[in-house]
Every structure is written in C-alpha cells, then in structure tokens.
Image (tube, grey):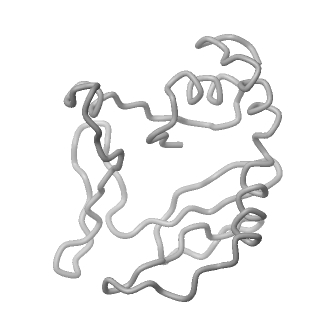
C-alpha cells in the first residue's frame, strides 16, 4: 500500500493490524516544502517512453517494466500489483481503469449513489480498523 495523503500514524496502524501486507512511507514532500504552503500530494512513475516499457533501477526500488495493474481480492482483503496486460489471478478483479484518454474523459460521470456504494464496498474490509482509529489513533506498534 502506498499512502499519499494518509496521516502517517493511520498508515502505520493499518500495517500493524495486518490490514495491509506492505507499506511504503515517504517524507519527501514534508521535508521539501514549507508547512505553511500548499503542495500537490502525488507520485509519478514513468512506465514507458516513446512506446517502450521502462523501469526504475534505483537500488531496492526495481520494478517490472511497463504499465501496472492492481488485482484486488475482497475476502480476505488484499491487493496484488502486476503488469497491465496480465490476466487477473483467480479470485481477484482488476482495479485500475482509464478515466482520461488523450485529455478527454472516458465515459460519463457515474451517479453519486454509485460512487458512494463503490467507496463503501472498498472501505468495508477496513471498517473495524477505521472505527478504532476514529476513537483514537493507536501509536506505532500498538496492537489493534
């Protein structure tokens, strides 16, 4: 799980509670931007250049070249990152889908009820953790 925009303590608590298998934590933005100035909280990964798949070669950060896809299993919840062209493993569904192509929205805007239902379904596997966090975020390493 990458957690851009999620408070560090929440991401650590989700990891400690085994809601996620692996987390990557970064502090680059907070170290490079003054706290009183807004910043854009994003990550950019180059996956192809001139139609050719590329990969990151930094020590400890090597990844398969090309576009990625997330394959989700609902019960028990887990996400698996693979290549875009891979077939979804049994019991998992593809998560990533293009929303913009060539600067134009692909498809229409879904009704708000559909968006809320999808959000609730995505959040459900973590609901017991969120209730606990709402009451008071556990410290790093604290048992959930």
As drawn, 92 above or below 52: above
As drawn, 121 above or below 47: above
Q: Quadrant of the N terminus?
A: top right
Q: Position of residue 20 (x, y in %)?
A: 64, 37
As drawn, 58 above or below 128: below
As drawn, 143 above or below 87: above
Q: Position of residue 52 (x, y in %)?
A: 22, 77
Q: Position of residue 144 (x, y in %)?
A: 77, 19
Q: Residue at x 75, y 40 (%)?
A: 126
Q: Residue at x 24, y 37 (%)?
A: 59
Numbered circles on residues, count: 0
Give the residue furthest to the left. Answer: 50
Give whichever of 37, 100 is nearer the camera.
Answer: 37
Give whichever of 128, 75 is nearer the camera.
Answer: 128
In the visual, does 41 lie left or right of 23?
A: left
Q: Residue at x 27, y 31 (%)?
A: 28
In the visual, does 34 lie left or right of 92?
A: left
Asked where in the image residue 51 lies, by quadrant, the reply is bottom left
Q: Position of residue 84 (x, y in %)?
A: 47, 73
In the visual, does 66 lie left or right of 2?
A: left
Give whichever of 115, 23 is nearer the camera.
Answer: 115
Asked where in the image residue 130 lies, by quadrant, the reply is top right
Q: Residue at x 25, y 52 (%)?
A: 56
């Amino acid at each position: 799980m990458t957690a851009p925009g999620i408070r560090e303590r929440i991401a650590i608590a989700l990891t400690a509670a085994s809601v996620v298998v692996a987390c990557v934590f970064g502090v680059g933005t907070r170290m490079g931007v003054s706290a009183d100035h807004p910043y854009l909280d994003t990550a950019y990964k180059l996956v192809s250049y001139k139609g050719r798949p590329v990969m990151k070669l930094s020590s400890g950060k090597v990844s398969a070249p090309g576009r990625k896809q997330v394959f989700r299993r609902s019960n028990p919840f887990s996400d698996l990152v693979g290549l875009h062209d891979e077939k979804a493993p049994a019991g998992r569904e593809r998560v990533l889908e293009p929303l913009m192509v060539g600067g134009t929205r692909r498809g229409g805007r879904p009704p708000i009820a559909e968006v809320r239902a999808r959000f609730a379904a995505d959040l459900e596997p973590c609901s017991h953790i969120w209730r606990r966090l709402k009451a008071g975020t556990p410290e790093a390493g604290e048992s959930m």
